[in-house]
Each structure stands twice: as C-alpha cells, then as structure tokens.
Amino acid sequence: MERAIRNAPNLLFAAALAGAAVLFLALTWHFTFLLDTWEFLMNRRDFTADAFFTPHNEHIVVLPVAIQQLFLHLFGMDSARPEYVLLTIGLLASDFLLFAYLRRRVGPWPALFGALLILFLGPAWELLLWPFEISLLGSVLFGLATLLVLERRDRVGDLLACLFLAISLGFSTLGIPFVAAALVAVLQSPRETWRRRAFIVAIPALLYALWYLGWGHDAESHMTLRNVLASPRFVTEALAAGVGNLFGLGSSPVTGATELIWGAALVLAIAATLGYRRWQRPGFDPGLWPVAAAATVNWFLTAFNQIPGRDPSSSRYQYTSCVFIVMVLANLLARERFSRRTLLIGAAVTLLALGPNLVVLKDGRDALEEQSNLVRADTAALEIAQRTVSPEFQLGAEVGTPGLVDIFAGRYFEAVGEYGSPAYSEAELAAAPAPGPHWADVVLSQALPLKTKVRLNGFDAEGGQGNCVTVAAGAPTLSGLSVHPGKTRIEVPPGPEAHLSMRRFAVGEFPVPFPAAPGGSTLVLNVPRDESPRHWYLHVTAEQPVRVCR
C-alpha cells in the first residue's frame, strides 16, 4: 500500500499522458494541412540550401523543413495524420521532461500538478493542435532536455547539452532563451571549469550566427524603438496572461475574450506569498537563475518584435510562457515542504483550472476544424477546375481561405502529382459542412473562370431561340435553373435590372454573384467544362419575366 501511494503521482501522470494522446489525436484526426504549413509544402520541397535555411517569419526553421520533407517522401500529401501524431509525441515528451524537471525540485505531487496544467493548457491550443508549431515545441522540448542534462555536471552531460541546444536552435529562434539559460548554468559552475565547458554554448551560438550571416539577416525584422520602449508593459501583460491562463482564468470560456485582470491579481498574490516566505527563509535555489534568464529573454525578444497579431495573450506564446512560469515557481518553492492539506488544495486548484482550459481547447479546435474544411474545399475546387485554371491562379482571402496564399495552381498540381492530394473528393465536397461548399463555388467561379458578356439593348421580343425557360416576374427561382457547360443566354425585357447568381456545391444559397443585367439586355454566360459532371444552378430575380435559354 505504501509503495502504491508513493508511486501514485507517476501512475497518474502516465495515465494523463495516455489520455492526452487520445484527446489530441481525437480532436485533430480528420484535419489536413493548415495555414503556414502550405509555405513549406509549396515552396520548400526541393533539397536545396535555400529551402532549409531561408527564415520563416524571422525564425530559423531548418529542422521543421527537414521533418516536412521527410514526411512528404514517407507518407505523401494525401493525409496530414503523421504530422499530428508527431506533434502529439512531441507534446508528451516535452511534458515528461517538464515533470522530471519539476520533480527534482518540488517532489512528485506538485510536479504532477504543474505538468497537468501544461499538458492541458487550452489557451495554448495553437501549439497543442497545429503541427506547424512543432518549430516552437521542438525548441522547448530540446531546451528542457538541455537544462536537465546540464545538471549531470559531467562530460557526457555537457556533450549532450551542446547537442540538444543546437537542435533547439535548429527548430526556431525560441532556442535563444535556452542559450541564455545554458550560459547562466555554465557561469554558475566553478570558474576553473568555464573554459572547458564554454563549448556547450559556443558551438550552437556559432552555428546560429553562421545561419544569420548567410540567410537570417535578410528576414523581415519588426524590432523598433517603439517596441523596445513599450517592452516592459508587454512583458508585464505577458506574465499576467500566462499566470491567468495557467490557472484557467486567462480566457473566458463563454466569450473567448482574454482577461488579464485575474492573471494580474494572481501574480500579485503569488509574489506576496513567495516574498513573505523568502523573508522567513532567505536565499534562492541556484536553479532559479538559468530559468529566470530564459524567461526574461523570451518575453523581451517577443516584445521587441511585437506586431498586430502577436499580442502578449496570443495562443502560440502561451505554452512557452507557462512552461517558464511553472519552472520559475518550482525553483522558488524548491526548499518548501508541502503538507497533505497543501497538496489537497493544489490538487483542487489543478482540477478547477483544467475545466475552463479544456473548454478553450475545444473552441480552438473548432476554429482549426473550419480552417481544415476550407482548405480541403478550396483545393478540391482547384482540382475540379484543373482543365482551364491558369498556373498563376492564387488562392487567398478574395477567393477562399486567407491562410492559403502560398497555393498557386501550377505549384499545387506539381505537388499533387508527386505526393497525392489532400482535397475533398467530389462526394465529400458535396456533403462537407458550411462554409466549405460556399467557398468552393467561389474558387471554382474564378478558377475556371465563369464569364459573362452583356449586350445592351440586345433584347429581342421575338427571340427565345433554343431550349428556353421563362422565370416569372417577381418569382425568384429558389432552387435555381440547371446550367450545363457552354453558353447560356439570359434575355431581360425592358424594365428594371435582373439580378443573377449561381451555386454548385453550396446548399440554400447562391454564393457566386454576377453584375446585374440591365433591362432590355441579353447576357451570355459561359461555363467551361471541368472535371465534375455536377451542374451549376442559376438564380434569377427580376420584376419582369426573364428568359433563360440553354
């Protein structure tokens, strides 16, 4: 019994890891490639130096690009599931290392509480559910590994620390805070060992410097004097956001809005409590300073490069912020002894925090699900229009999903021909949830493209040649008139203008509008033939009878 109680934190943590794996994979199992991932898929498929070393949003991304290329060759582009599996493995590994780090300082039960708060950190949903963020996760994972092996204080530990630190930097510039942490850890060792251990930091820093001189200096920088001067406030807000999110009080589970007030109140309460304990028992654990250095460098570098969309409470920053906060707290509490009552309170606080954070995680998942739906719908439309679409045709905000600006038709078809297609099949597109079919119709209309030509004063009362249908005055065709490939003539008698729109996969709406046809005119609609036998449907609204001749 005593042994079971002693092992209970480890068993609970193992169960939590298994549950998290099931949860993350269940939430993302049907997702495809999203947003920035397409920059790699479209532009970095070649085995060239530029493909690996060109920065992405100021970040070094050597290892994420290598992983993307490896996965393309192993698994193709039909499914993104291998990426989501890798992300899940990375999250579990990172949390395992965090648990090990915390356990060395505060014991198994507090370590369990801290690791659970990070494992199910809903406000960090972008990192938990989007494989592209393996760049940031990889830096954290190998940064934690660096700090752990540095505590060995032997030659093997130093060699591993150098390797892990270089890998951390290879994932993203988030490795820089861990360089600062490693430097402080080395400087904490006896002075006579500094020269012998300097390689731990020097080699990764040199590799990063070489990358920066070769490629990184060309990256767009957002560092400005304004950002530098505003950085103290940014860091303060980042700390408040992180603490609030950690304890389930940073994001409203009802509105999704960020609420810094609760985090700020918690920061003050924690600071007052820890300050009182340090007054009673002066001194700090030496392990505090490397982590404090890493957290400080992380927050200030983020502040220096702040732009709209990179706010202190941004989801992609919360994972790293909260990891550092938990590690700092563990070092501040390293000499504390926790009573059973204190541990019960900690367990209750942890459980209360998990509920709201799981709600936020679910909301984030819903946002990514819609993005996945749009990606598969837009690319399906592109493939249907393959016969006539221009190779330079670009997806983006005007014709579909803003996150697909890296997709040009020519490059996309090259990738599909080599690695397979992630798009919906035609049957899947027809059954897809909104707004996927809506935007698929919009993409199709411009990719084919659908064209109209108006002949003013071209209405012939004696016309109506061909297979014609008359739309009664003031009676819009709610279901639409079937339109075949080729030319369709819309004859509008004198009077008010007629309003025309079309649909193909959309249901209950006609998302493709055309310029109004003036009274007394004839409009010719040209529909190119494509890869789908599915008909288009024309919607006509006018105050006078309109003839549609197919």
Image (tube, rainbow, N blue to C red):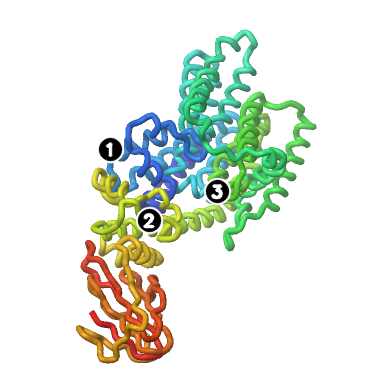
Q: Is residue 56 left or right of residue 422?
A: right
Residue 453 placement (x, y as % from top left): 33, 73
Residue at image position (63%, 22%) is 184
Amino acid of disc 2:
Val
Q: Which residue is mark 1?
A: 73
Q: CA distance from mark 3 to mark 2?
A: 21 Å
Q: Of tags 3 and 2, which is closer to the observer?
A: 2
**The disc labelled 1 sits on which kind of residue?**
His
**x and y percent of residue 470 in the render?**
29, 88
How packed mark 2 is, by other alpha carbons closer than 10 Å (few <14, some 14-19, many 20 or more), is many
Point 38% across, 45% down: residue: 84
Q: Report the Cα–Cα distance between label 1 and label 3.
A: 31 Å
Q: Camera-side residue: 277 or 323?
A: 323
Residue 238 % position (x, y): 65, 44
Amino acid type at circle 3 is Ser
Q: Identify the residue at horizontal 74%, vertical 44% (top origin).
A: 268
Which quadrant: the C terminus?
bottom left
In primary-sequence order, the first of circles 1 and 3 is 1
Say if 544 sits above or below 50 in the image. Answer: below
Q: Looking at the image, is mark 3 or mark 2 earlier in the sequence?
A: 3
Q: Secondary structure at mark 1?
A: helix
Percent of width and height locating residue 547: 29, 86
In this view of the protein, can residue 430 be seen by the observer?
A: yes
Q: Quadrant of residue 235?
A: top right
Residue at mark 2: 375
Q: Dot 1, how many residues are within 10 Å of its Cα: few (below 14), some (14-19), or many (20+)?
A: few
CB under 8 Å between discs 2 and 1: no
Q: Farthest residue in the top direction? A: 192
- Give the residue pinned by disc 3: 315
Indicate left or right for 479 with 319 as reference. Answer: left
User: Would residue 380 appear left or right of 16 to someone viewing this image?
Assistant: left
Q: Which mark is residue 160?
A: none
